[in-house]
Image (cartoon, rainbow, N blue to C red):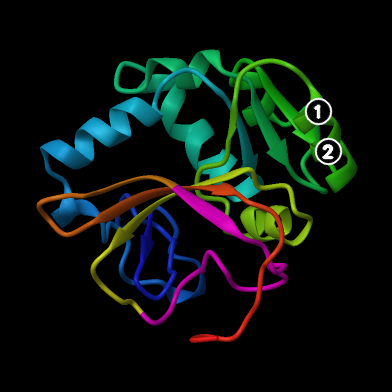
Amino acid sequence: MITLDGVMQAPGGPKEDTSGGFKYGGWTASYGDEVYSEVVQKELQPADYLLGRKTFEIWADYWPEHGDFWPGINEGTKYVFSKNMKKSDPRVTGWKKSIVIKNVADIKKLKKTKGADIQVWGSSKLVQLLLKNDLVDELRLKIHPLTLGKGKKLFDKGTIPAAFTLTESIITPGGVIIATYTRAGKVKTGTVGA
């Protein structure tokens, strides 16, 4: 979930992530409709999850008690990327199938394993790290028709040049562009009109 200017911070609610003085939490709320809900329900199918520490902490406080909305979230393995979090942290031990990973090498190993798809939700710094290290196979973007100026951004620091192919898209009645892009090799350049 991003804005036209790439902000992805706190789409779900006013208190979700106020870091940096962010005042627009819950900016997606007015864009929900039947089409949007159908797309989200498809994305909530069982998977495994790679999350940054802050997103993991927010989720670990919420999803164990609200699994009726997203049944697969409690059953999927949650990999939390953190250099400081301990395996013994109560959030890790309290939310079943939660595993701490510490570095990019761990992510590369995880990516090579067979099993469920690995989804990343939120986790702006983690997504930037994945983009920087060419570890993104697919981007599922919900581009909302607004700008916020400030906030954590999807494409901010370290993104490498990379080509993607649009594999699926839809526009909701509220004007949200929902687009899926898959990795498509290197950037090709040329001269327009040649």
Task: Say which quarter of the image contains residue 38.
Answer: top left
- Give SS at disc 1: helix
Q: What is the magenta range?
A: 149-166
Magenta stretch encompasses residue 169: no
Q: Nearer the viewer, residue 117 or 186?
A: 186
Q: Is residue 150 magenta?
A: yes
Q: Which residue lies furthest to the front in this view?
A: 194
Q: Mark 1 points at which residue?
A: 112
Residue 178 picture location, percent across and down: 31, 50
Q: Residue furthest right?
A: 105
Amino acid tagged 2? Lys
Q: Is residue 103 visible?
A: no
Q: Image quadrant of residue 106?
A: top right
Q: Which mark is residue 147?
A: none
Q: In this view, does 61 lie to the left or right of 102?
A: left
Residue bearing mark 2: 108
Q: In which quarter of the image is the C terminus?
A: bottom right
Residue visible at 72% across and 71% down in the picture: 158
Residue 146 against residue 166 in the figure, above or below: below
Secondary element at tag 2 = helix
Q: Which amino acid does label 1 sit on?
A: Lys
Q: How far apart are marks 1 and 2 (CA)?
A: 6 Å
Q: Residue at x 43, y 68 (%)?
A: 7
Q: In this view of the protein, can residue 176 be seen by the observer?
A: yes
Contact? badges 1 and 2 (CB < 8 Å): yes
* Residue 49 at x, y percent in the picture: 59, 31
In the picture provided, is 74 more to the left or to the right than 68? Answer: right
